[in-house]
Image (cartoon, coloured by chain):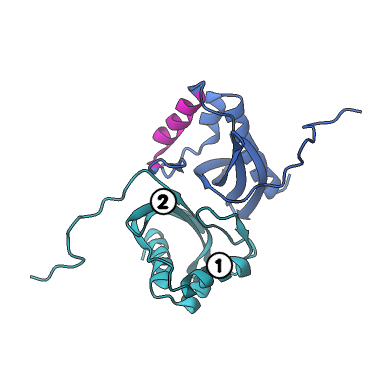
Chain colours: A blue, B cyan
Amino acid sequence: MSDTDAVLFANEAFYRAFADRDENAMDALWSDSDQVACLHPGWGPLFGREIVVESWKAIIRNDESPEILCHDPRAHVYGDTAYVICFEEIMNTFLVATNVFVREGRVWKMVHHQAGPTSAQPEIEQGAPAASVN
Amino acid sequence: MSDTDAVLFANEAFYRAFADRDENAMDALWSDSDQVACLHPGWGPLFGREIVVESWKAIIRNDESPEILCHDPRAHVYGDTAYVICFEEIMNTFLVATNVFVREGRVWKMVHHQAGPTSAQPEIEQGAPAASVN
């Protein structure tokens, strides 16, 4: 698996953990580094692993939190650090996000997330099934 | 100068280039990498050095573009890559930004910028002079 594919896989794991409301997976995918940060849209900045991970767990635990779908992720890899830009679809509106990852051993871990409003939309195949079986 | 200080210096140079409306400085501080990206608040994603740098030059050239002041920058360094989180003050409102830098030779160059709305405010000493002389 190329570095780019591995980073995209880590990015997908983040949205998968959210979709599955899997607190353990969400916890595990964030870096153990003290430098973890998160800019939830409209919130103030969050700094530190414990605060950031707990914010995501609280969102996951809230049954009223809407689903988030990731579209058009693009990975930019610089050695052992990478960032992904992607769209987030939330209740038929779109945000654009930056997710930063660092390689820890053989695994890419998340160290930073920012999402905010955008005027653009991802290229989504309207009406296409998620998977087709013929 | 520590890596953290050098990254904060590069971050300051970005806002200084904007304040000075210095197109050459703005051009020079962005990485020559093809992986350059930018998420202006409310815009669609921009990819590629030429497109990103030209967007900033166009903003700088526009006399109606408001000033941007940077507050509370925090640098997170991972080897030859770093990201800075800071507040941006624009016409008495605040955004929060992620600026990603990579080390190219001895210089930290910008590869990505995202800014978006925040409910928080930086810690600004209200009414304090920029510098006091006694």
Image quarter of residue A38: top left
Taking the view exactly as shown, the residue that stands out farthest to the front is B64
Measuring from the top left, give residue A107's x and y in whole percent.
60, 40
Q: Does label 1 or label 2 sit earlier along the sequence?
A: 1
- Asked if residue A96 lies left or right of residue B134, the reply is right
**Image coordinates for residue A80, horizontal then vertical, percent:** 58, 51
| Mark seen at residue A115 | none
Expressed as whole percent of the image width and height from the top left, the position of residue B77 reads 45, 54
Residue occupying image coordinates x 36% and y 66%:
B1
Q: Is residue A128 left or right of residue A36?
A: right
Q: Circle 1 sits on which residue?
A: B55
Q: How many labels sit on residues?
A: 2
**x and y percentages locating residue A40 in the rendered image:** 46, 40
Span highlighted in magenta in the image? A46-60
Q: Judge if badges 1 and 2 mark residues of a common chain.
A: yes
Q: Amino acid at mark 1?
A: Ser
Q: Secondary structure at mark 2?
A: strand
- Write the residue at 64% across / 39% down: A70
**In the image, is residue B70 part of the stretch drawn in magenta?**
no
Q: Classify A42 as above or below B5.
A: above
Q: What chain is tagged by disc 1?
A: B
Q: Residue at x 70, y 45 (%)?
A: A5
Q: Nearer the viewer, mark 1 or mark 2?
A: 1
User: Is A117 left or right of B63, judged from the image as shown?
Assistant: right
Q: Is residue A47 magenta?
A: yes
The answer to whether the residues at label 1 and label 2 have Cβ atoms under 8 Å apart is no
Nearest the eye: B49 or A123: A123
**Residue that carries the numbered disc 2 in the rendered image:** B96
Residue closer to the observer: A80 or B65:
B65
Distance between mark 1 and mark 2 Cα atoms: 19 Å
